[in-house]
Image (cartoon, helix red, strand yellow):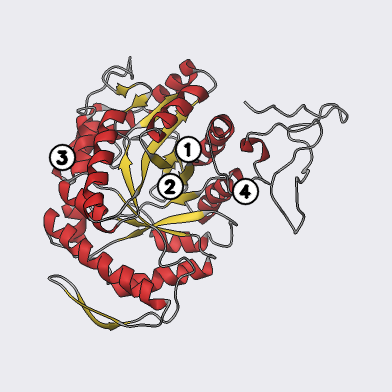
Amino acid sequence: MTLKILWFIPTHGDSRYLGTSRGGRQTDLAYFKQVAVAADSLGYEGVLLPTGRSCEDPWTVATSLIDATRHLKFLVALRPGLITPVQSARIAATFDRLSGGRLLLNLVTGGDAEELEGDGLFLPHSERYALSSEFLTIWREALTRSHRGEPYDFIGKHLKVRGAKLLYPPVQRPYPPLFFGGSSPEAHELAAQQLDTYLTWGEPPAAVAEKVADIRARAAKYGRTLSFGIRLHVIVRETEDAAWAAAAELVQHLDPATVAAAQTKFARMDSEGQRRMAALHGGQYDPANIRKGLEVSPNLWAGVGLVRGGAGTALVGNPQQVADRIQEYADLGLEYFVMSGYPHLEEAYRFAELVFPLLPLALRDKLSQPLASGRAAPTGATPSGGDAAGVSGPIYTGPFGEIVANTYVPQAAAAR
């Protein structure tokens, strides 16, 4: 299985340290473009844009990045109950057309009742999934029928439409791929019925295997199959010791009051996924030994979740260790890996340069990242693989690395 690696646009803020304003940086359009262009040129499949009141609006940010990128896909949120399904379908079709088919959709039902009430949605947990099911039914049918110019009627408990119609269909048929993550039985059932890719947060492999098996069994009852993925942070360095030192540095300015406040807030959420993330660490950590009680599986560290909601685990280790852990998840059937690291610009480069060559990837832009294709390059020139500007066969892009004394071209690294 070739793996698809996505990165993350930090529209809720970015920093060198968690839980403090120290090391924080301005997250504005210029910075978002820097991260997106880096991900695009390095060969990432796409980028996830988070959603919620702590984030900039993901659709606006994603739209602003279309012209800054060439191949990068955008995993953008659908929010049932906060927008009508047909209007959401129209926005998705427009974005897909303007980006040349580079849209991915991430269904987010929401796990924070307080935040949802602030946005005007007052349904309890189970009813939100019922609403999401109706939303997806209308959304999918509206987009599918748009390719034929047909209207659509639907009457449900929460939603109804009469003569719903889209005049401009999306590029991707029948609609852009649908991603989704949720850990409750209702979430698994919704995924089995209507979603294309199920994303889990970074739990230990045994727990992920149980999720995959459950959703596969549920989907089989409907004659469906899904692809699977995982959302993880990553802290990779040349050596294992350096990676764990970097993890310790990331949380070195945390104080117990901040951790306690974050955990109190997370405990009020009705998200099963958030409960499972919190259970991995219990809100406890030892500043003198950040692996103690937080390394919940080999190289899987729950320290990020001390103060960050949602995805709260990171792969920590040297390049081979990180690649091995990714392959361990891939062996369970996971194809998509949505990664991030603090700060996101620098870590996008570090992860790609250190780990991409060790993974079976279908890189989208080999011209910009030739060595990650796994092929050796001759001294002085590097083949990119694939066509560019109508030229067939290998394309030589010139040397990589600093030329020594204006004469000596660095030897390209052989395939690992």
Q: Residue furthest right?
A: 407
Mark 4 or mark 3, which is nearer the start of the sequence? 3
Determine whether the residue tagged by mark 3 lies in a helix, strand or loop.
helix
One can see residue 21 in this view: no
Q: Nearer the viewer, residue 31 or 355?
A: 355
Q: Label 2 vs label 1: CA separation?
A: 9 Å
Res. 250 mark: none
- Picture residue at 61% right of the left edge, 47% below the top: 41
Determine whether the residue tagged by mark 4 lies in a helix, strand or loop.
loop
Task: Indicate the amino acid at tag 3.
Answer: Ala
Q: How many neighbours does mark 4 have within 10 angstroms: few (below 14), some (14-19), or many (20 or more)?
A: many
One can see residue 412 in this view: yes
Mark 3 or mark 2, which is nearer the start of the sequence? 2
Q: Which residue is mark 2?
A: 10
Q: Which residue is mark 4?
A: 365
User: Is mark 3 in CB contact (under 8 Å) with mark 4?
Assistant: no
Q: Is residue 384 left or right of residue 172?
A: right
Task: Indicate the amino acid at tag 2.
Answer: Pro
Q: Position of residue 145 (x, y in %)?
A: 36, 76
Task: Indicate the amino acid at tag 1.
Answer: Pro
Q: Which residue is mark 1?
A: 343
Q: Nearer the viewer, residue 370 or 294?
A: 370
Q: Which residue is mark 3?
A: 267
Q: Label 1 vs label 3: CA separation?
A: 27 Å
Q: Label 3 vs label 4: CA separation?
A: 42 Å
